[in-house]
Amino acid sequence: MVSSCTDGSNPFSLVQNTNGIIYGTTVAGGTYNQGSVFSLSVGIAPFVEALPYAATTGKSVKILGQGLTGTTGVSFNGTAASFTVASDTFLTTTVPVGASSGFVTVSNPSGDMTSNQQFQVLP
């Protein structure tokens, strides 16, 4: 362990936010050698995350993201879906009839955001 590293050492956890920024913690280093919290931006564009990432048609799906307040459309692999915006970072939608497995896309005036993994439409 390096105790003289004021910006942290021995990375412990990493998580990527839907804004594209990676956040993490270290177990050592920092001001009092008790670790630190850091962020790293590597130019990844904002994206959305569907929860769950698999469901049958007609089922409700939660969408996490950034800048969702102005959402104008949601689609499952190109098939339009109804949606309700709950906040700037959360909306709900329903898997539409005719949807096929693929990426979820959320459209707003700033552009389109695509899911970070493919959504699976279950039989």
Image: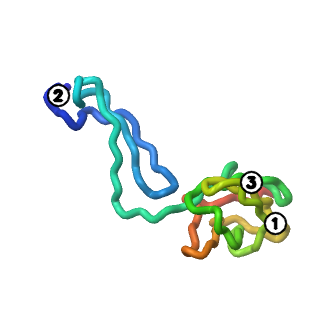
Residues at badges 1 and 3 in contact (C-beta under 8 Å)?
no
Few, some or many residues within 10 Å of mark 3 (<14, 14–19, 20+):
some
Say which amino acid is labelled 2.
Answer: Val
In this picture the colour scheme is rainbow
Residue 9 x, y percent position in the rendering: 24, 33
Q: Earlier in the sequence, mark 1 or mark 3?
A: 3
Q: Earlier in the sequence, mark 2 or mark 3?
A: 2
Element carrying mark 2: loop
Q: Is residue 58 left or right of residue 31?
A: right
- How far apart marks 2 and 1 lie (CA) works out to 53 Å
Q: Is residue 33 left or right of residue 74?
A: left
Residues at badges 2 and 1 in contact (C-beta under 8 Å)?
no
Mark number displayed over residue 36:
none
Which quarter of the figure is the C terminus placed in? bottom right
Name the residue at 76% across, 73% down.
80
Name the residue at 24% across, 34% down.
8
Q: Above or below — where is 74 with respect to 20?
A: below
Element carrying mark 1: loop
Task: Find residue 108 and report its image quarter.
Answer: bottom right
Residue 91 x, y percent position in the rendering: 70, 56
State the residue position of label 3: 61
State the residue position of label 2: 2
Element carrying mark 3: strand
Q: Nearer the viewer, residue 53 or 110?
A: 110
State the residue position of label 1: 96
